[in-house]
Image (cartoon, coloured by chain):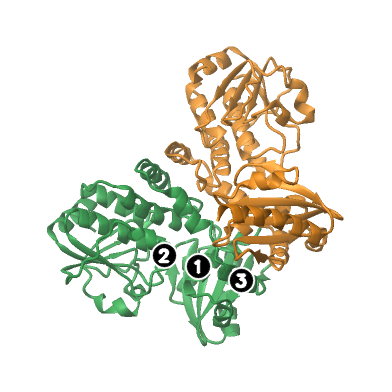
Chain colours: A green, B orange
Amino acid sequence: MKSLKDIADIIKKEDYFYILTHQSPDGDTLGSAAALCKALQKLNKHAKILCSDSIPTKYDYLFDGLKTQNFEAKFIVAVDIADTQLLGNPLFAYKDKIDLCIDHHPSNTHYAKNYFIDATAAANAEIIFDLINELNVFIDKDIANSIYTGLSTDTGCFRYSNTTSKTFRIAADLIDKDADFSMINKIMFDTKSKAKLELEKLVLQTLTFYFNNRCAVIEVTKEMLKQTNCNDSDTDGLTSLPRKIENVIAGITIKEKEPNIYKISLRTESPLNASKICQNFNGGGHSRAAGCTIEGNIDFVKNSFLAAIEKEIEEII
Amino acid sequence: MKSLKDIADIIKKEDYFYILTHQSPDGDTLGSAAALCKALQKLNKHAKILCSDSIPTKYDYLFDGLKTQNFEAKFIVAVDIADTQLLGNPLFAYKDKIDLCIDHHPSNTHYAKNYFIDATAAANAEIIFDLINELNVFIDKDIANSIYTGLSTDTGCFRYSNTTSKTFRIAADLIDKDADFSMINKIMFDTKSKAKLELEKLVLQTLTFYFNNRCAVIEVTKEMLKQTNCNDSDTDGLTSLPRKIENVIAGITIKEKEPNIYKISLRTESPLNASKICQNFNGGGHSRAAGCTIEGNIDFVKNSFLAAIEKEIEEII
């Protein structure tokens, strides 16, 4: 792996950048991309952000201060993307052409020509903060807002155990650079659409407990989304819900993607390793948060996953 | 006002401390008291914490590493107490005997012989952090946990606009001193009892919107509490729920206290003044959060309050 200084040196030599974000974009992939894009444009380079999915309107402010530029890329950067599978269909054509990957997922598959991966970073945006400093670009309010968005969304606003003293120190620097953290926190953590609340009501009706209340499961069907006029991104916050319940060490969200295809999100308490459990189903992620996709009818999917959970719980207790 | 160094010099000369916390104790008054008490004991002084109310069990860990000592106080310190009214009845006898007050409320009434008040501190525990450094006491894990508790609880885990870069930098230092922030966040912000979740499900069924979705109302009845085995303190978090809904500027929680007596909690967005609206019903509070009590049947109570809201909304829009 190259040093961050080497990465900065490579970037300095290039002029036409596409920055790829992962499908179902979150605050960290978008915040990382927006901060980097602004920094590159400040260096008078051409840069734009690509995403396979449409970007939820709540992230609109990330694009403040960005110029829209049309050009052919000569250098392709992927941010916060552990695996090319996560590029999504429209961007999948880039999978073998990625010049640089900047990521913080330990499961990163090293698909790019150059990469910088720091699994100790709570958010990918932490690496982007260091990189922008390495590039000697002044972090203005717009860049600060973008980095803060990555930091706060990937740490549940500094709540999750992945947060480090470095995360806090970067946040302090960003506030000193006038990041509008109060506005961002309101949008990201303190606003719920009516539709989303209706969805939550339906989903809560499915809440079921297993293994002596150590495991809680919720289900989200396409019918629920339709009924409440919600889209896929409205389900984001739901995945943290079951794990919040007292004594629960495995919180599971089973989301219907297509008929007989279910995406499972797992949130765990120590020592239960979420990534290890999801690897049984060709998934992965972090030790406290991971996911996988299982095909079959809902009962088969649920029972298969619960069996894997039970095995792990038995091993650790 | 004395400097923090002067305050430290005064403290160094004393040996027998009572540390008073405010009634209905929260994480900041208790965290401040616990950190200071541990620091004083490390200086081989006698110190103990007093509170008028019993301390909720979730704060048990704050008392880790504290020695229980029986002695007569010669120096009385109040932490995070804006006014002697907030001492509560059992501690009210100390109201004219307080030697030192350390506080961050701008409304502090300067009731003590010596005081140090910093209204720019997001949490009182920030001042305690500086004071302990001024006392040259090493901040160990137990002290770090106590200060972190004050910081995180008074800022909604670094979400509220009172948070500053200093808050973040102190949090970073505390994490480096091994503060168990993940455990503390889990207890304070990320744990919901099964009973409370059941209550939330019932309460959400009552959610109603008014005035073009600018106003959202939820109701909590005694029957709901009984049915879910919840007590009054389980309703705490509910009051912030309606205001979180997109476009809502007035979030109302109507809680049945006794038959035909209802407590109303109002949360507003700028420019709607919650305190002003509640004053119509002999209530009060802050501009964004206020409350009042109205007698009558539920329909009368709701309609009376909604009429007051409508009048204000019409005035500002």
Q: Is A98 located above or below residue B157 in the figure? A: below
Q: Which residue is mark 1?
A: A236
Q: Residue at x 80, y 59 (%)?
A: B300
> Farthest residue toward the top?
B13
Q: Which residue is mark 3?
A: A198
Q: Residue at x 37, y 40 (%)?
A: A176
Disc 1 chain ID = A
Asked if marks 1 and 2 touch (Cβ < 8 Å), the reply is yes
Instruction: Locate the C terminus of chain B and report the quarter of the image it occupies.
Output: bottom right
Q: Please give the label number shown on residue A26.
A: 2
Q: Nearer the viewer, residue B25 or A218?
A: B25
Q: CA distance from mark 3 to mark 1?
A: 14 Å
Q: Nearer the viewer, residue A220 or A176?
A: A176
Disc 2 chain ID = A
Point out residue B198 in the picture as x, y percentages from the top left corner.
Answer: 72, 64
Q: Nearer the viewer, residue B315 or B190?
A: B315
Q: Earlier in the sequence, mark 3 or mark 2?
A: 2
**Residue B132 shows up from this direction:** yes
